[in-house]
């Protein structure tokens, strides 16, 4: 239970920020799922386009503080490797 006005305000603010962050992470996951689905489907052009759309969303998540920088770097690297292999095949 909050004992000060500042703590009460913090509780209200944390709830609002949690909703915003939840929406951000959900949006990022949607972009990543679309990119992974196109990679599995084997369409090189669509995979490249989906990857190009997912990458800035993931980096924006890092900038906003909802995802860790190294986690996103690892995921982007792995996805880029798959897209490149698909394009060469």
Image (spheres, rainbow, N blue to C red):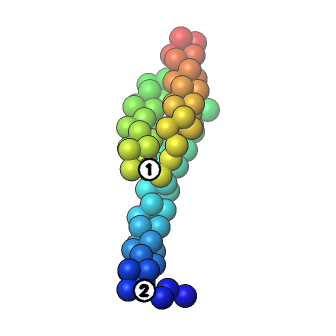
**For mark 1, does the 10 Å Cα neighbourhood hold few (<14), some (14 to 19), or many (20 or more) residues?**
few
Of the residues under marks 1 and 2, which one precedes in the sequence? 2
- Observer-nearest of 28 and 71: 71
User: Picture coordinates of residue 53 (x, y %)?
Assistant: 39, 37
Q: Nearer the viewer, mark 1 or mark 2?
A: 2
Disc 1 from disc 2: Cα separation: 27 Å
**Quick check: 19 above or below 7?**
above
Name the quadrant containing residue 39.
top right
Q: Single out the residue that lies furthest toward the right.
A: 40
Quick one: SS at disc 1?
Answer: loop
Name the quadrant containing residue 52.
top left
Which residue appears at 41% of the width and 67% of the height? 17
User: Picture coordinates of residue 14 (x, y %)?
Assistant: 44, 71
Tell me, yes or no, if residue 42 can be seen here. no
User: Picture coordinates of residue 86 (x, y %)?
Assistant: 56, 19
Q: Single out the residue that lies furthest toward the front.
A: 4
Which residue appears at 47% of the width and 67% of the height? 18
Quick one: SS at disc 2?
Answer: loop
- Observer-nearest of 10 and 79: 10
User: Picture coordinates of residue 8 (x, y %)?
Assistant: 42, 84
Residue that numbered label 1 is attached to = 65
* Image quarter hosting the N terminus: bottom right
**For mark 2, does the 10 Å Cα neighbourhood hold few (<14), some (14 to 19), or many (20 or more) residues?**
few
* Image quarter hosting the C terminus: top right
Which residue appears at 45% of the width and 74% of the height? 15
- Observer-nearest of 68 and 40: 68
Left or right of 71, for residue 50: left
**Quick check: 34 above or below 83?**
below
Residue that numbered label 2 is attached to = 4
């Amino acid at each position: 239970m909050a004992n000060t006005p500042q703590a009460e305000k913090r509780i209200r603010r944390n709830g609002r920020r949690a909703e915003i962050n939840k929406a951000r992470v959900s949006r990022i996951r949607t972009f990543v799922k679309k990119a992974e689905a196109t990679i599995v489907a084997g369409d090189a052009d669509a995979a490249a386009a989906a990857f190009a759309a997912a990458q800035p969303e993931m980096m924006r998540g890092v900038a906003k503080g909802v995802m860790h920088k190294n986690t996103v770097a690892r995921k982007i690297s792995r996805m880029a490797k798959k897209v490149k292999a698909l394009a060469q095949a």
